[in-house]
Image (cartoon, rainbow, N blue to C red):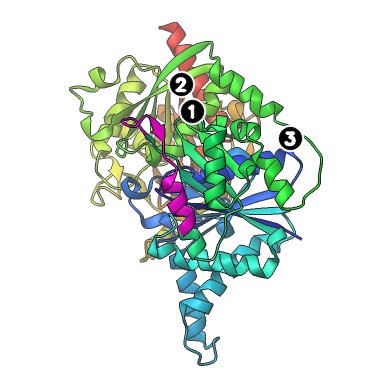
Amino acid sequence: MTKYIFVTGGVTSSLGKGIISASLAKLLQARGYRVTIQKFDPYINIDPGTLNPYEHGECYVTEDGAETDLDLGHYERFLDAPTSQANNITTGRIYQNVINKEREGAYLGKTVQVVPHITDEIKRNIRILGESNQYDIVITELGGTVGDIESLPYIEAVRQFRWEVGIGNSLVIHLTLIPFLAAAGELKTKPTQHSVKMLLEYGIQPDILVCRTEHHLSQEIRKKIALFCNVNANAVIESIDASTIYDVPLLMLKEQLDKIVLSKLKLTKNQEPNLETWKDFLGRLKNPTAEVKIGLVGKYVELPDAYKSINESFIHAGAKNECKVRVKCVHSEDITPENAAEKLSGLDGILVAPGFGSRGIEGKITAIQFVRENNIPFFGICLGMQCAVVEFGRNVLGWKDAHSTEMNDATLHPVISMMEEQKKVRNKGGTMRLGSYKCEIKKGTKAAAIYGKTNISERHRHRYEFNNAFMKDYEDAGLIASGINPDNNLVEIIEMKNHPFFVASQFHPELKSTVTNPHPLFVNFVAASLAHSRKK
């Protein structure tokens, strides 16, 4: 029978439930178990696809085209395994499913209520992964904190679910905070006690407490927490602040979190965790032999989580190249032709980030002109590729009004235009070109050398594309389409001849970069930036 682990949070948000969940999953996977993680988000949006990046961070896209919470990126990066629509459920989707059933008459005239109908739908979504026969263990992270009004149906669903499957087949890990009061010079356990008490009031006794802390927990504090929270002393786990999230699996291994979990779930596989590849990655990450400075040009740079997967991909690629990647965020609205040299000088490479809308677009185009003319390695993603096409059209082909119809639908040179199937779309949520699509790479190109093969598959999230009516003009001038979708002839990759590294993709390579499999585009971009740095 599939075993179920639920991860809840208390005291405050942003304690790192996603990282703890991913770290535990990594340890269990390293012991030979088949593990997956799902995230329940208590907001009413159907998915984060229409949420502002300033509010929610990046929108992560899965292979099957689901727009999901950014924590799914952590799950995939740690486990090196794809997630799907079933791995991220929101309150909006739960209620939508229940209301659709009510409209269909599925409840036979009964009054539809939070209990049992909403909680039953939550439990159904918990079981989807467990009953697929693909996993030995399903870890479910509950978003928000205990006590949030919007989280109550999920807590009640977990209480019911645990009773249905049996205590030995499930457990609850509660992540909480042990704050350090500088004035008193001591750690305080009372917030944790109150958080557990609130969870108990809802009918759930946590099996394991993971305590976020800035200072090590003494045995005395652990015993105190255990006594007042009804858990065993060895089930009080210290989660101390780490220099990198990739340290957390090893910290949890040291705390024996995986052993305690396996004991409580009565799983007896004696295989020791194989983490040699992970340790090798950490060794490279922490002992770089060189350093590069790469500019990230975007319009959401105030919030690092808006480009979470890009930043993590740089970490993976940096470790692969045994170099430290220092990312300098540059707001695209601040870049002008007059100050471009000042803003971008000293950088060894520049990545122009994805995004939507006209704000900051001219700054991105100006940045691309600067790197193209100064032979600085350039990497563009999604809108970054589209901006590269616009810049080349304006400054090389001489079409001064070249633009995307997203920004200027009256241009005489619509070098980027809306996809035909998108022109009839009215709803914004979940209607873009989403998920994994094939790409055929032309032999003899830089892209072919980077991938080492000519048939690939990458993930997308866009409505606009390169306008193939202008293809010949671009390729005659030296900007070639090196990757094409075989089904609709969509340009997926562009690159420029006679440039150290000028590559851009319509897809999002950052969504497939993991610790054990860094994405080749990022690895080669960092390598090119390192070569540029040494040349300077």
Question: N-terminal of the two: label 1 or label 2?
Answer: 1
Based on the displayed image, in which of its 4 quarters is residue 81 positioned? top right
Per the rendering, the mark at residue 325 is 2
**Where in the figure is residue 123, as x and y percent of width and height?**
59, 68
Question: Residue at the location (44% across, 19% down)?
Answer: 499
**Circle 3: is it few (<14), some (14-19), or many (20+) Cα within 10 Å?**
some
Residue 190 is inside the magenta segment: yes
| Pick the front one: 486 or 194 | 194
Q: What residue does disc 1 label?
A: 314
Q: Which residues are magenta?
A: 181-197
Q: Amino acid at mark 3?
A: Pro
Q: Quadrant of the N terminus?
A: bottom right
Q: Are marks 1 and 2 in contact (CB under 8 Å)?
A: yes
- Between 394 and 308, the one nearer to me in the picture: 308
Amino acid type, mark 1: Phe
User: Residue 403's quadrant in the figure?
Assistant: top left
Q: How many marks?
A: 3
- Tag 2–tag 3 contact (CB < 8 Å): no
Residue 32: x and y in percent read 76, 42
SS at mark 1 in the image: helix
